[in-house]
Structures are given as C-alpha cells and as structure tokens.
C-alpha cells in the first residue's frame, strides 16, 4: 500500500468560502442576495478581514458572487456565471490539457442529447425564436455585420438549450458556447451561408419532431464547423 502524505490544515479563506457555498446549496442564500459587509463577516467567522477578502475574491473568480464598489456595492450572489467555468477550461486549453477536438467531441455528445430533448419539449414559441435567430443571422451577414452575426450564431445554441426546459442542460450549453467564444475562428460570409442553410434544414426537422433527422443535421453541422475552426 502507498504511504500517506501528512494531513495539512485548510486555509482560512477556503473554510469561509465553503461555508458560503454550503449556504447557497442549502438555499439559505439565493441569487441576488447581498452578503454582510466584510467587517461583519470577519466578526461572524472569527477571522481577519483579509481572510474574508481573499475568500470573496476566490468566490468571485469561481462565478458564485459578484463584487460591486460604491455606496450600493458589496458582494452579491450571482445566478451562475458560465464564463468562469469556460475560463478555467480555456486555461487548460492553452496549457495543453485540452484541444479543439475535445471541445467538438463534447459538443457532439451533449448537443445531440439536447437536440433530442428539444424535439420532444420545444414549444411553438421556442421554434419561432430559433427561426427569428436564423433570419437575423442571414440579414446581418448580408449587411456585413460579422461580429453581431457571430454573437447570434452562438446564441442559436443557447436558444436550443432553452428549448429543453432543463436548467442543467441550459447551463451546459452556455458554458460550451462561452468556451467556444474563446477558441473559435471567424468564418466567411460564404461559410455562414452554409450554416444558415443547415440551420433551416435542422429547424424543419425540429418542427417535424424528427429526432434522428435533427440530430444528424446538427452532428454534420458541428463536424463541418470543427474543420473550419481548425484551419490555419
């Protein structure tokens, strides 16, 4: 049997952070709630304000709280920040722990499941929002507004996640899309025309409640996008 390493005491700011996390998990703290001032927290935890400040910075970095300055500032519980998770994954990407292929593989696995759930659960209003997104992307591409077009292209997948009505799937899609913002390469207007055509085929299958057809169209679309992003 391997030998054990000595047990190390946990740092104070980690203990503070875990207690705040536990209150969020239990529902005692909810999105939008404001934490007590640093001085009050230090008194309650029986520690220094520096330890509290370090804990709050760590929680902000993790996306659990947001810190605001000014008379009406303070530490507020957020509604979840997928960008914080995406940033951690991006760091791994740059450190060599992840490759674009890994992201594409994850998208294929997760988004295929989301498509099948959307086929069963999407309302007509959901489908209309997807239609409006596709029409807007086509118009922006025609007008040459490629940045706004890119934002809407990414937003299409978030809207698709929202079709499932499942908050976990919606969060996963937001995380994947925020990560994609960091690593994707711009695509041309010609390539965007292919994306729009694929989206229209996909939406037609979604409206027909054709789960396999919609999943196949999405899988082919993501595979083509991977090849475009991998260029250069």
Image: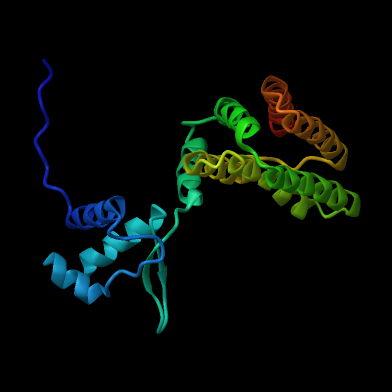
Q: Residue furthest top?
A: 1
Q: Nearer the viewer, residue 62 or 113?
A: 113
Q: Quadrant of residue 69?
A: bottom left
Q: Left or right of 217: which side holds 34?
A: left
Q: Residue furthest right?
A: 142
Residue 187: where, in percent of width, then height? 78, 40
Q: Left or right of 107: which side holds 140?
A: right
Instruction: Name the quadrant of the C terminus.
Output: top right
* Residue shown at the point (59%, 44%) measured from the top left: 162
> Is 143 situated above or below 109?
below
* Residue shown at the point (81%, 48%) measured from the top left: 137
Q: Nearer the viewer, residue 118 or 15?
A: 118
Q: Quadrant of residue 207?
A: top right
Residue 1: where, in percent of width, then height? 11, 15
Q: Is residue 114 visible?
A: yes
* Residue shown at the point (76%, 55%) measured from the top left: 148
Q: Residue furthest bottom?
A: 71
Q: Quadrant of residue 119?
A: top right
Residue 197: where, in percent of width, then height? 84, 34
Q: Nearer the viewer, residue 114 or 228?
A: 114
Count of labels in the image: 0
Q: Left or right of 32: which side holds 227?
A: right
The structure's colour scheme is rainbow
Residue 106: where, in percent of width, then height? 54, 28
Q: Nearer the viewer, residue 184 or 22?
A: 22
Q: Is residue 232 visible?
A: no
């Amino acid at each position: 049997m391997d030998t054990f390493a000595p047990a190390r005491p946990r740092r104070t700011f980690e203990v503070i952070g875990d207690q705040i996390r536990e209150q969020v998990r239990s529902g005692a703290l909810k999105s939008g709630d404001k934490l007590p001032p640093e001085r009050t927290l230090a008194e309650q935890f029986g520690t220094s304000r520096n330890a509290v400040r370090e804990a709050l910075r760590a929680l902000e970095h993790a996306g659990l709280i947001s810190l605001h300055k000014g008379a009406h500032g303070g530490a507020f519980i957020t509604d979840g920040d997928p960008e914080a998770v995406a940033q951690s994954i991006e760091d791994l990407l740059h450190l060599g722990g992840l490759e674009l292929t890994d992201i594409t593989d994850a998208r294929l696995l997760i988004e295929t499941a989301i498509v099948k759930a959307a086929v069963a659960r999407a309302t007509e209003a959901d489908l209309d929002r997807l239609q409006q997104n596709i029409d807007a992307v086509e118009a922006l591409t025609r007008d040459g507004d490629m940045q706004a077009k890119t934002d809407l292209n990414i937003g299409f997948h978030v809207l698709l996640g929202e079709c499932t009505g499942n908050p976990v799937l919606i969060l996963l899609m937001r995380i994947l899309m925020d990560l994609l913002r960091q690593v994707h390469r711009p695509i041309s207007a010609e390539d965007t025309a292919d994306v729009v055509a694929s989206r229209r085929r996909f939406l037609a299958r979604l409206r027909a409640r054709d789960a396999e057809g919609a999943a196949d169209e999405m899988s082919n679309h993501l595979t083509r996008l991977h090849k475009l992003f991998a260029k250069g």
